[in-house]
Image (spheres, helix red, strand yellow):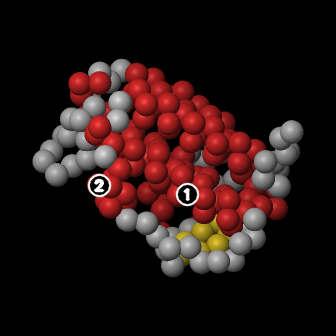
Amino acid sequence: METKIDAAELQRPAPDEYAPYYERYISQVAPGTDILDLLAAQSAETAALLEGIEETHGNRRYAPGKWSIKEVVGHVIDSERVFAYRLLRFSRNDATALEGFDQDRYVASADFDSAALEALKAEFADVRRSTIALLHHLQPEAWVRSGVANGNRMSVRALAYVIAGHERHHMAILRERYL
């Protein structure tokens, strides 16, 4: 059973709900957007984008030292897992401060280039379904709870927007620089 979420919980987070760095992602979500609908729509949009990429192009980099297409997709998957974990902890009133993560180390350690692009596409879809299920089951008051991650206060609502904006940011980079 899904919890009925009040429109106030789904509103764009206020600037004091996240570190300024995250504005680059939150600003990717248009004001008035239903964040739950957007997250669901993104799953299909990302699948369609990745479907159009041949496996032989998965290891392509737009410049030396840049991530490959597969590494970008893997980074989006890893980041969503980290952000959703933070969201879970904060929504459950866990006051333990969480450490940051080194995205470059995660990508270097994952060996995404040896994975099939089809497998990464399926993994993204699975992770996104999990994120959406988590969000659908939050109690209304949980959306405005917050915690500290990487030394910065962040609300649950802001994390949902960051997940959507981060994916949108990286899919735009794939379209503009790789395809």
State which quarter of the image contains the N terminus: top right
Residue count near mark 2 (Cα–Cα under 10 Å), binned few <14, some 14–19, many ≥20: few
Q: Which mark is residue 108?
A: 2
x, y (%) of residue 36?
Answer: 67, 41
Q: Residue 118's image quarter?
A: top left
Residue 19 or 55: which is nearer the viewer? 55
Residue 11 or 101: which is nearer the viewer? 101
Query: CA gap, disc 2 to disc 1?
Result: 19 Å
Callout 2, which amino acid? Ala
Q: In the rendered view, would you say 64 is above or below 142?
A: above
Callout 1, which amino acid? Phe
Q: Residue at x 60, y 54 (%)?
A: 84
x, y (%) of residue 114?
Answer: 29, 37
Q: Residue 83's image quarter?
A: bottom right
Q: Residue at x 15, y 45 (%)?
A: 63
Q: Give the mark toward the camera: 2 or 1.
A: 2
**Element under label 2?**
helix
Residue 10 appearing in the image: yes
x, y (%) of residue 43?
Answer: 55, 33
Residue 149 or 140: which is nearer the viewer? 149
State which quarter of the image contains the C terminus: top left
